[in-house]
Image (spheres, rainbow, N blue to C red):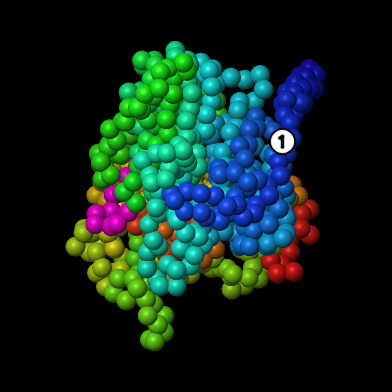
């Protein structure tokens, strides 16, 4: 009897698998990245854009689909595309971080990304991943439920991506390079944008305002994406309530609010009902700037919601929170809860294998030779750090190539689980304390075993000044167990961990002068450096938005996954944003060990090649 039962079980499993495959499709796009002349804020500018648009192409897929994107780099700069928030299961080589999982796409060259989208649905996005190109090279990536499935809320009348961006009246590469040359912070942006338009509060912009027409009584799903480089943004719609139903492509318990906060890289899905008197209403966004005394772009971008068949009228303006309204920011972030038993819900892992306590802050890096002149504080350079390690990417060989070729001297495996010095992390009196503010550059990795559970406490520090730090983890979602202010209390804080219905996301803002605790399972197999589906197994964690570069108002930190010689390596990233905008080189890497998929990885080993062939 046992054999027939086993055969029936296998047949049913095969049928379920074939049905899932049958419902999936291959979605194919071509990206032509090249110069585009645009007029904004009384200036004519040449930017880099995809297919002649800002934002770039909207990608729509269903859960289970395979996405294929052919990228043709016709710009004058090196380029990669990062698929922000995609797990990249068995396709870590397609994640996009340059000199981590792949070599840059050189000018007049092309590259094809191919990956399957599994276990995710909601709003994500894609963006350029070399230097500051993502300021204008970005777009929405919408993952609809698998065909035959539905949302865990009534189907909306319409779905609209709302991309919040940042604009400079200058070449963004020049802005970044100037900051790199001086060691000081980059220049602030000149405007913010909604779907590429600054809005009519800016000069010469009366016709550069995004407009959304709505039908009275209908409900709409706004898919809000913060594509800004450096600023967290408050978003509000005059006289309309919003119901948050998802963040970072993970469903939440419905939360009614009149204001949304999104950090760079985050997405928030909200339902709004057009239930107000037919007229025109502003949607507006401006910065949440938590660093005291630091200059920032204190302007407001607007779009207009226009009721169908309403009489022309001056739009009503919402009352946005003050730029430094930390209580409102914390209330929004801490009140979000996960939708237990909703689609793709994952319970909190209770057994912890790896504990890490990671200080996150903006410090200083030595200027260089005695003859060098730097414009940062104390005559040094700004440098972000985690546990006093300021991350630096290779320049000639990707980390994945170094692992595959067993090349030494590219990275080390000694990233510390704890900071080298215990002190009062959030005491403002420690700002510019020369005994602790200096850091050094390195490429350090932390190893963990495959399928282990990792808990990380991120602790804000006052090396240069206190500010909120968004942190992004590539290749994984994580549970946000708790967040608070001051120094983390290892005895009492765990008593208040939410182990029942915490929010799940890929990007979190560590509160200004505070801490956040995340937990995730290092179970993402897959890796390679080309478009072939040849997986390996590993997990990486660390910061940096691009190769050895500085980002204004934020520092990206890379997550890199590595393994032993017998294990494939997958590089992911964590992104740490500094709203003051300094040198981005703080990171740590988590390496996940597993021999499970080594043979699959080896099938694709011929795809690995030098960055400079």
Judging depth in this view, the residue of 347 and 111 nearest the camera is 111
Instruction: From the top left corner, tell me how far across and down residue 114 is, in percent.
Output: 71, 45
Quadrant, the C terminus: bottom right
Please tell me which residue is depicted at 45% across the width and 56% down the height of the picture. Answer: 169
Q: Is residue 292 magenta?
A: yes
Could you classify mark 1 by the number of other residues whose Cα lies within 10 Å: few (under 14), some (14-19), or many (20 or more)? some
What's the magenta bit mostly, secondary-structure-wise? loop
Quadrant, the N terminus: top right
Judging depth in this view, the residue of 382 and 444 nearest the camera is 382
Please tell me which residue is depicted at 48% across the width and 27% down the height of the picture. Answer: 212
User: In which quarter of the view is residue 34 placed?
Assistant: bottom right
Image vertical order of residue 240 relative to residue 264, above or below:
above
Please tell me which residue is depicted at 41% across the width and 58% down the height of the picture. Answer: 552
**For mark 1, what is the residue?**
27
Judging depth in this view, the residue of 597 and 152 nearest the camera is 152
User: In which quarter of the view is residue 201 placed?
Assistant: top left
Instruction: From the top left corner, tell me how far across and down residue 143 is, in percent.
Output: 60, 32
Image vertical order of residue 377 relative to residue 90, above or below:
below
Residue range in magenta is: 286-296
Q: Does the magenta stretch include residue 572?
A: no
Element type at mark 1 = strand
Judging depth in this view, the residue of 142 and 339 nearest the camera is 142
User: In which quarter of the view is residue 151 placed?
Assistant: top right
């Amino acid at each position: 009897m046992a054999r027939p039962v086993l055969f029936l079980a296998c047949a049913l499993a095969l049928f379920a698998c074939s049905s899932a495959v049958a419902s999936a499709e291959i979605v194919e796009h071509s990206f032509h990245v090249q110069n585009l002349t645009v007029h904004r804020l009384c200036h004519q500018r040449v930017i880099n854009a995809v297919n002649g648009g800002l934002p770039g192409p909207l990608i729509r897929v269903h859960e289970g689909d395979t996405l294929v994107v052919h990228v043709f780099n016709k710009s004058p700069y090196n380029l990669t595309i990062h698929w922000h928030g995609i797990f990249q299961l068995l396709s870590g080589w397609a994640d996009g971080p340059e000199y981590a999982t792949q070599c840059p796409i050189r000018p007049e060259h092309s590259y094809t990304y191919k990956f399957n989208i599994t276990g995710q649905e909601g709003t994500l996005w894609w963006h350029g991943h070399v230097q500051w190109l993502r300021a204008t090279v970005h777009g929405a990536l919408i993952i609809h439920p698998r065909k035959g499935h539905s949302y865990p809320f009534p189907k909306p009348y319409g779905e609209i991506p709302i991309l919040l961006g940042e604009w400079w009246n200058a070449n963004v590469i020049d802005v970044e390079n100037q900051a790199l040359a001086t060691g000081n912070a980059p220049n602030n942006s000149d405007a913010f944008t909604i779907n590429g338009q600054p809005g009519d509060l800016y000069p010469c912009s009366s016709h550069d305002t995004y407009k959304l027409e709505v039908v009275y009584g209908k409900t709409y799903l706004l898919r809000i994406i913060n594509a800004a480089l450096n600023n967290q943004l408050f978003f509000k719609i005059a006289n309309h309530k919003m119901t948050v139903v998802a963040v970072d492509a993970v469903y939440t318990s419905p939360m009614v609010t009149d204001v949304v906060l999104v950090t760079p890289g985050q997405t928030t899905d909200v339902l709004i009902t057009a239930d107000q008197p037919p007229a025109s209403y502003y949607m507006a966004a401006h910065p949440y700037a938590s660093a005291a005394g630091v200059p920032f772009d204190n302007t407001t971008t607007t779009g207009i919601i226009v009721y169908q068949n309403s009489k022309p009228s001056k739009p009503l303006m919402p009352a946005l929170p003050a730029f430094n309204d930390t209580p409102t920011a914390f209330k929004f972030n801490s009140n979000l809860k996960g939708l237990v038993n909703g689609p793709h819900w994952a319970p909190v892992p209770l057994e912890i294998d790896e504990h890490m306590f990671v200080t996150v802050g903006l410090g200083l890096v030595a200027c260089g030779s005695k003859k060098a002149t730097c414009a940062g504080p104390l005559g040094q350079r700004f440098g972000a750090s985690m546990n006093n390690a300021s991350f630096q990417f290779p320049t000639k060989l990707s980390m994945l190539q170094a692992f595959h070729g067993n090349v030494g001297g590219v990275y080390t495996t000694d990233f510390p689980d704890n900071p080298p010095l215990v002190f009062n992390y959030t005491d403002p009196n420690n700002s510019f304390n020369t005994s602790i503010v200096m850091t050094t550059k390195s490429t350090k990795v932390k190893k963990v075993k495959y399928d282990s559970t990792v808990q990380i406490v991120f602790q804000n520090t006052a090396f240069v000044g206190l500010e909120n730090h968004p942190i992004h983890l590539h290749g994984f979602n994580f549970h946000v167990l708790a967040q608070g202010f001051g120094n983390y209390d290892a005895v009492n804080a765990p008593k208040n961990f939410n182990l029942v219905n915490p929010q799940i996301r890929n990007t979190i803002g560590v509160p200004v002068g505070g801490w956040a605790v995340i937990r995730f399972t290092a179970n993402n197999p897959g890796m390679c450096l080309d478009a072939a589906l040849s997986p390996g197994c590993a997990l990486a964690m660390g910061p940096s938005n691009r190769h050895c570069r500085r980002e204004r108002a934020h520092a990206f930190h890379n997550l890199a996954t590595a393994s032993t010689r017998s294990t494939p390596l997958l590089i992911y990233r964590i992104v740490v944003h500094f709203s003051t905008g300094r040198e981005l080189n703080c990171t740590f890497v988590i390496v996940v060990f597993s021999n499970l998929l080594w043979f699959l990885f080896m099938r694709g080993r011929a795809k690995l090649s030098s960055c400079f062939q």
